[in-house]
Image: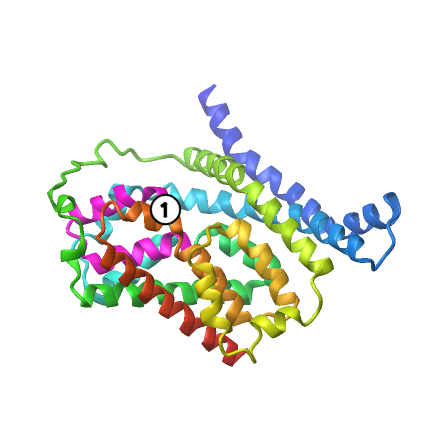
């Protein structure tokens, strides 16, 4: 019986792939048929195009999320907090920052995990700068952000986001490490002993890892679908009703202040990638430049207000402000760079 269950876990995802492809491939014609023929709405009106945008984008994004999160979930099954700490233990300087940033992409940690991760890294002797590279990369370059960017802008923009996010995480962490700011960590942190969190880890079979991917889909999509819906609804409204050229005047290349303004607006805001990227998509459609839009998105996702509040328990205010300043400056450089290139 156990063997039958394992085989089912192995073959069910494979069997679902053709169904996923058929649904995804026919989304546009089905949406047009529903809007134009079934509902019979007038083509080209603001209301019609807003509804068309929402009906098409919502299932498309959820389908992409489901597929990518499943495979990323399988990758994540190879990582635990203890294993991640062991990989980073003893690493220093630039190589450590690079490795920590790469691990931040694939490990299943968010802002709510910031304190236990920070404590575990400190106890393992991971340098402060390397720790910050991980803490920056983990929320900023996550699978939700990459999937949404790929679905709405294509692989080039998604790749740009990943590479620039990595550059910010590596450079910011390296800079913090060079500044030797350990005295701005709360004193009690260095006195904490967490013990061996990784004791008892077992090797998992492929069927178990597939199940891990399935659980990741249930957990992550179950949490973010409402943010996806809200973000796409806001984007749909802007798609239909925001005048052409308005965003170009406010967030276009010609406005030199657009990048720092977008970062200043984004820092105190809180949204995850699922909520903000559909809005960014419409900002670009309406005339905002790519660099300014990316800077806004990075500041909202990478400098999350709740994460700052959580980190306040382990960091003193000067280090938090230094962290915000360095990351914010890096985001502005990225914004200006891509406004110049594109």
Q: Residue furthest top?
A: 1
Q: Residue furthest left?
A: 191
Q: Nearer the viewer, residue 101 or 1?
A: 101
Q: Nearer the viewer, residue 90 or 149?
A: 149
Q: Is residue 137 left or right of residue 210?
A: left
Q: Is residue 173 left or right of residue 214?
A: left
Could you tell me if residue 109 is visible in this image?
no
Q: Residue at x 15, y 64 (%)?
A: 180
Which region is colored magenta? Answer: 111-140
* Magenta-drawn stretch, dominant element (helix, strand or loop): helix
Viewport quadrant of the C terminus: bottom right
User: Which x, y percent locates residue 167?
Assistant: 36, 67
User: Which x, y percent locates residue 133?
Assistant: 30, 59
Residue beneath disc 1 = 111
Judge whether 19 appears above or below 258 on screen: above
Q: Residue at x 64, y 52 (%)?
A: 234
Q: Residue at x 26, y 41 (%)?
A: 116
Q: Nearer the viewer, residue 262 or 293?
A: 262
User: Which x, y percent locates residue 322?
Assistant: 27, 63
Residue 190 part of the magenta segment: no
Circle 1 packing at 10 Å, graded few (<14), some (14-19), many (20+), is many
Q: Residue at x 13, y 47 (%)?
A: 187
Residue 116 part of the magenta segment: yes
């Amino acid at each position: 019986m156990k063997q039958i269950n394992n085989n089912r876990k192995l073959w069910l995802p494979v069997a679902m792939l053709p169904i996923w492809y058929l649904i995804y491939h026919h989304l546009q014609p089905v949406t047009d048929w529903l809007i134009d023929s079934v509902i019979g709405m007038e083509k080209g009106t603001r209301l019609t195009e807003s509804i068309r945008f929402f009906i098409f984008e919502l299932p498309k994004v959820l389908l992409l999320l489901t597929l990518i999160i499943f495979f990323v979930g399988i990758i994540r099954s190879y990582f635990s907090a203890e294993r991640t700490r062991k990989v980073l233990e003893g690493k220093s300087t630039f190589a450590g920052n690079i490795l920590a940033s790469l691990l931040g992409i694939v490990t299943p940690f968010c802002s709510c995990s910031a304190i236990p991760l920070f404590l575990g890294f400190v106890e393992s002797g991971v340098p402060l700068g390397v720790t910050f590279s991980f803490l920056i990369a983990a929320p900023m370059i996550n699978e939700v952000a990459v999937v949404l960017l790929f679905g709405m802008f294509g692989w080039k923009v998604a790749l740009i986001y990943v590479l620039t996010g990595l550059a910010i995480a590596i450079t910011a962490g390296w800079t913090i490490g060079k500044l030797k700011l350990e005295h701005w960590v709360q004193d009690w942190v260095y006195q904490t002993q967490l013990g061996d969190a990784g004791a008892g880890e077992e090797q998992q079979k492929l069927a178990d890892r597939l199940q891990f991917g399935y659980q990741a889909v249930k957990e992550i999509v179950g949490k973010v679908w409402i943010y996806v819906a809200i973000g796409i609804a806001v984007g749909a409204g802007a798609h239909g009703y925001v005048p052409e050229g308005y965003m170009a005047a406010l967030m276009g290349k010609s406005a030199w202040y657009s990048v720092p303004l977008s970062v200043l607006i984004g820092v105190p805001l809180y949204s995850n990638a699922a909520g903000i990227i559909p809005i960014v998509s419409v900002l670009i459609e309406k005339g905002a430049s790519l660099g300014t839009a990316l800077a806004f998105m990075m500041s909202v996702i990478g400098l999350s207000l709740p994460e700052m509040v959580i980190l306040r328990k382990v960091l003193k205010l000067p280090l938090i402000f230094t962290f915000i300043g360095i990351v914010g400056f890096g985001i502005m450089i990225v914004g200006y760079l891509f406004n110049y290139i594109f």
